[in-house]
Image (tube, rainbow, N blue to C red):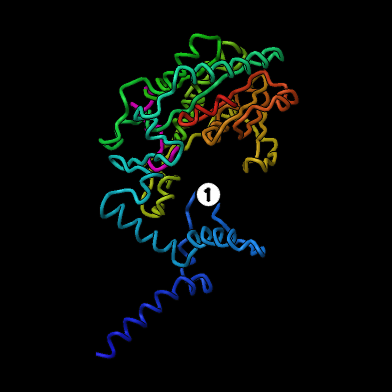
Amino acid sequence: MHIRPRLVAFTFAILLLLPTLDQILGLSARFSSTENRKLNGIPALNFPHLRSFVKQFDRYYKENFGWRNALFYAYSRWKFNVLGQSPLPEKVVVGKDGWLYLGNSYNRVIDQHRGLLPLSADSARLITNHLLQRQQELAKQGTQLYVLVAPDSHTIYPEYLPDHLQLSPAPSRLDILKQTAAKTTLHFVDIRDTLRAAKRGHVIYYQTDTHWNEYGTLIGSATLLNYIRHDQPTIPPVRLADYHIEKQKGGAGDLITMLTLQDEKKDPIYYYIKPVPGRAARQTALVPNDAIGFPSTRFTGTGSGKLLFIGDSFSHGMMSYLPGYFRESYFVRANKLDPALVKVERPTVVVIEIVERNIDKLATF
C-alpha cells in the first residue's frame, strides 16, 4: 500500500526531470528539427526588464524543451501512418494517392484556391498598373519586362486534393489578374495550359514538395522562352530533343520533411535532365546576398542578349535551362525589382517570377 504511491511519485518526478536532462545531456539529439524557420534562441537577462525576459524565455522553452522533437516524431507517425491525417494540417494537407499540398499557414493558400479570398478587380488593376509602370521604366532603357507566375500544385493537380477542399468553380485570383493584364500591353506569361498538357504524359510536380519537379521546370522554362522569342527572335528555339531526360527514384520533398517522415515516404518519380553541350550554360560567379539568404548566380551561355531574372524558390530549377539561351544571365532571389541593379546590369530582358499564392506581392515588386 505504501510502495504504490511512492512509485507513482518517483515516476512523476522522473518525467518532470526528463526534459531538463535531455537539454543538458542531449539524449534525443538524433531527432532534429525539420521546421522551415529559425527557432528562438535563449534570451539574455537584462535587469530590470524581467517581464520581457519571462515572455521571451517562455517562447524559447516552448520551441526547445527536451524531447520536443522526439515526441513530435512519434506523434507524426501515429497521426500520418495510423490515422491517415496530417500532423500539421495548417502547414501540410494530406491529399489522395500520396499527394501532399501546402496548407493555409502559407498566405492562406487553401482558402485562395477554394475561392474564399478572391482577388478584387481593384486589386488586379493596382497590380497591373504597377507592373505596367515598371515595364515602361525598363523600356526607356531598352529592356523588355516579362512577368511569370508559377502555378501552385493545387492548380495543376486539383484532382488529388481532399474532397472537402476542392477548388472553387469561380475564376481564380490568377484568372482575374490575367484578364486584367490582357487588356494592357503587359507581357504577362501564363503557363498553366502548357503544364496541364504536359502532365498527360509526365508527372510535373513533386508529390511531397511545394515545387514543380525537373520536368515541370523544363516545360515552364520552355514556355517562357517561346513567349520571349516573339520579341527577341535571336534567342535560339527551344527543343525537347536538346535534353537528355531520364526517370529515377525520387527523394523526400519539403512537405514530407516538415512532417519528419522523410525517411519513410519518397516521391515515386524523379527526373534527371541534362542539356546537350550547345544548350548548357557555365556558371561564372556566386554573389552573396545576406538580405535574402540565397546567393545570386551568374552564367554565360551560347545564346544572345542578357537576362536578369528576379524570382523566388521556383526560379532555382530554372537556372538549369534558361541561361543556355542567353549570352549572359544573372539570377537574383528577391521580392522586389531594384532599379539600381537594372541600371548596373543593363539587361535586354528582365523576368519577374512569383509563385501563384503570392501574386498579391506583385503590387510592390
Question: Is residue 203 part of the magenta span, yes or no?
Answer: yes
Q: Say few, some or many: other residues with alpha carbon within 10 Å of mark 1 (under 14 / 14 to 19 / 20 or more).
A: few
- Pick the front one: 125 or 282: 125
At a point 48% along the width and 25% down the height, the residue shown is 220
Judge whether 262 appears above or below 204 on screen.
below
Where on the picture, by quarter, is residue 350?
Answer: top right
- Pick the front one: 234 or 77: 77
On the image, the x and y values in percent for residue 253 come to: 44, 45
Residue at the disc numbered 1: 37
- Quadrant of the rendering where the C terminus is positioned: top right
Where on the picture, by quarter, is residue 160?
Answer: top left
At a point 29% along the width and 48% down the height, the residue shown is 85
Magenta stretch mostly in which secondary structure?
A: loop
The amino acid marked with disc number 1 is: Arg
* Bounds of the magenta segment: 197-210
Judge whether 147 appears above or below 210 on screen.
above
On the image, the x and y values in percent for residue 330 come to: 66, 30
Lateral position of residue 308 relative to residue 126, left or right = right
At a point 48% along the width and 24% down the height, the residue shown is 241
- Pick the front one: 287 or 251: 287
